[in-house]
Each structure stands twice: as structure tokens, then as C-alpha cells.
Amino acid sequence: MSDVVVTSEGALSILRLHRAEKKNALTGAMYTALSHALKEANADDGVGAIVILGQPGIFCAGNDIKDFIGFAMGGGIGQPILDFLRALVANEKPLVAGVDGAAIGIGTTMILHCDYAVASNRSVFATPFVDLGLVPEAASSLIVPQLMGNRLAFEMLAMGAKFDANRARETGLVNAVTEPSTLEADTLETARAIAARPREAVRLTRRLIRGDPSAILARIDEEAKLFSERLMSKEARQAFEAFLAKGKS
């Protein structure tokens, strides 16, 4: 079975991360599959909303480290990652996330591009980029300050603070908190309600809310340049070596 399972349910296109044994860490192939699924859903007039789900107890642990090191050795952040980030920005359909458990790195920053997010009360959000000698990605350095203000953005992005579900709701990262047993049902119920609304009116309203995407795309490119430079740094090399050594112990 694919590590990204795409299914349809009525007017919903459901993208499910299906790599629980690796905590849904995203590989290059998974990024490509997600990009393709977003583009397919956008081209389908029958789709009224797109839903991103993980597995029970784990949403996404971030980038797969082995794939990530491979990208780093190639001298960049990795084209599949950039393609996915740009597909998120290009997406014109309502995007709903259902988060149960850990959402780390890209697991958190992809939620910034969603229109509505539901989290279970056992969910935790963290962006440990600086801990790895890196900088934020997915335009999070632009979106998080707009969402939370500079001080909370510094706490999340620079200090790597973990936000529990309630704090994520208080800061606007997610809309609602629910029980793990009902997380998926609650997420799909919300997505169905969105999909049932007048499609063109929703699309235009969403566009007005989000405004010109050029600043977000420019920030993605700026972050990617710095990210690539940081991957070659002594700080990042030492951090990755320590991470890999910890995983072997």
C-alpha cells in the first residue's frame, strides 16, 4: 500500500498519511504523491473540500531523515519538498486537517496552509528547525508572526517550544480540539459542511481572505535558500550527527 492513500467520499478528497511505522515521516515520494493529489483534487469539479489525515496517535513526525540527508548532500532542500509547498499555495479548494498526536516540523507548518484544522486533545505541535541548525520553511516565518504575533512566533520557531492542543487553539493554529476517538469523524463532518456550501462563493471568499500569494511564495524561496545554506553548516552537521547517534542508541 502507498504511504499516501487518496480516497474520495462524496465531495471530499481525503489524503491520508499511511506510514505509521515511521511516524508518518515524509519521504520524497510522499511529498510527490501529496502534490499530485492536491493538483488532482483542484482539477476535479466534484471535489468541494480536501482533507489531510494521519494515523491514530500520529499525524506527521516531519521529514524522513534519510531522505532529508540525501537532499542535503545534493545541496538543497529537495525539489519534491518545494513542489509540495508550492502546491499548497496554489491550492484553491478548502483544505481541512485532522491532527491526532505529534505534528512535528512540516507536520505543523503544512497546517498553516489549511483553512480549518481540528486537533485531538493529545496532539502536540513543534517546529525544531533551529535545534537542527536550520531555519523555518513553508513560509512559516511569515505566516506564524501574522497568526500569533512576533513573541509567540519566536517561541515556536526559534525556541522550538512545543504547543499542546489547547495552546494551539488559543494561538489560532487550530480551530477546534476534540477527543482522539472522534477526531476523524469531527474533521470529516466539518469538511462535509464546507463542501456543501456554495462552491464558487467559498472559493472567492477564500481567495479574498488569503490575498495575493506572491509574498508567501517569495518567503518559501527565501527560506529554501537559507535552509540549503544551513544544511551545509557546521551547526547542522553536528545536529544531524547527534540525532542519528541518538537513534542508534
Image (cartoon, rainbow, N blue to C red):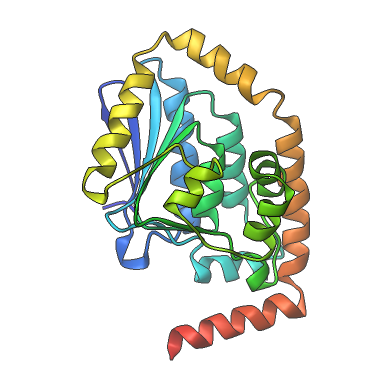
Q: Which residue sits at x=73%, y=62%?
A: 228
Q: Which residue sits at x=76%, y=34%?
A: 215
Which quadrant: the C terminus?
Answer: bottom left
Viewer-side residue, 226 vs 141: 141
Question: Which residue is farthest bottom?
Answer: 249
Viewer-side residue, 123 vs 105: 123
Q: Is residue 77 visible?
A: no
Viewer-side residue, 31 vs 102: 102
Q: Is residue 171 left or right of residue 159?
A: left
| Residue 165 to residue 12: above or below | below
Q: Is residue 224 visible?
A: yes
| Residue 95 to residue 63: above or below | above
Q: How many marks?
A: 0
Q: Is residue 125 left or right of residue 242?
A: left
Q: Is residue 181 left or right of residue 225?
A: left
Residue 237: x and y, percent?
68, 79
Quarter of image, res 13: top left
Residue 133: x and y, percent?
70, 72
Quarter of image, res 132: bottom right
Residue 151: x and y, percent?
71, 53
Quarter of image, res 135: bottom right
| Residue 159 to residue 201: above or below | below
Viewer-side residue, 216 vs 64: 216
Residue 66: x and y, percent?
51, 71
Q: Which residue sits at x=57%, y=12%?
A: 204
Q: Is residue 161 left or right of residue 57?
A: right
Q: Which residue sits at x=78%, y=49%?
A: 222
